[in-house]
Amino acid sequence: MTIKVAVFDAYGTLFDVAAAARRASREPGGAALAAHWQELAATWRDKQLQYTWLRAITGQHEPFWRVTVDALDYALEAHGLSEQATLRDRLLALYRELDAYPEVPEMLSRLRAGGLPTAILSNGSPEMLLDAVTSAGIGDLLDAVLSVEDVGVYKPDARVYSMVGARFDCTPKEVLFVSSNGWDAAGAAGFGFRTIWVNRAGLPMDRLPDRPAHVLTDLESVPELATAP
């Protein structure tokens, strides 16, 4: 079936979630972070995802910004940096303006040039997504930015994936969904999307009932897969 819309997860897929810690470690005053910014970034991301799953399971939804702050506080304490208030504030500010991966603007431009609408479907809060999209300068390359806040639950709940069909008047099989999270790509595949897992880190495939149709190491070849039979 012909693909009618290309939809992307935001954090880790279009935007580099490690960028905040990396940039903070290189700034004046970042010495405390310089030696292990990668470890802090990984803990921050792991807890951020874990908290979304736990909140979805327990029905205790909070906006993604709250989850992001809580995850950072955990990560700072875990790495002995909980007393660094200035660093905490800077990391949170930088998270609102994460770097997009280098191939993102051209890849989105190629999809749009081929007549395919593009969208974000993200756990992110609307204001967070607006900041990230604006900072990356890709707003004019997106037809929609969809946030889970409209349904009040996090991925991989089916109510999140159903937002795409409601917005673009299409069936699941007419959606190409791209995520850097293996569990997200699997969840979307189970919903009926044609999915791509962007496996930048070379991780093993998640042992889940559904699997992505394609696995890539970056986003460059997404336009070709979007038009493949």
Image (cartoon, rainbow, N blue to C red):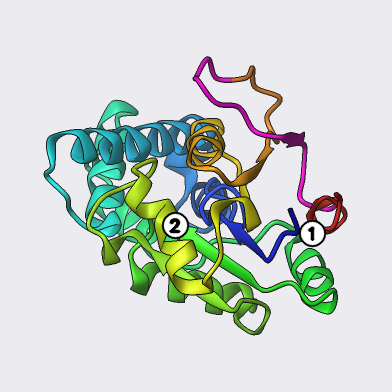
N-term-proximal mark, 1 vs 2 = 1
Q: Is residue 183 magenta?
A: no
Count of picture labels: 2
Magenta stretch, residue numbers: 206-220
Would you call the spot at circle 1 few (<14 residues within 10 Å), some (14-19), or many (20 or more)?
few
Q: Position of residue 212 (x, y in %)?
A: 64, 33
Q: What is the distance, in whole Å, between disc 1 and disc 2 at their CAs?
A: 19 Å
Q: Is 43 on the left-hand or right-hand side of 61?
A: right
Q: Is residue 216 magenta?
A: yes
Instruction: Give the structural element (helix, strand or loop) at label 1.
Output: loop
Magenta span dominant secondary structure: loop
Q: Amino acid at mark 2?
A: Ser
Q: Is 59 on the left-hand or right-hand side of 188?
A: left
Q: Amino acid at mark 1?
A: Glu
Looking at this view, name the residue that lies furthest to the bottom: 140
Q: Is 21 on the left-hand or right-hand side of 52?
A: right
Q: Residue at x 11, y 44 (%)?
A: 60
In the picture, the disc for residue 122 is: 2
Q: Residue at x 70, y 36 (%)?
A: 200
Quarter of image, res 157:
top left
Circle 1 sits on which residue?
Answer: 103
Q: Residue at x 77, y 37 (%)?
A: 217
Q: Residue at x 34, y 40 (%)?
A: 48
The residue lying toward the viewer, choosing from 39 and 155, is: 155
Quarter of image, res 58:
top left
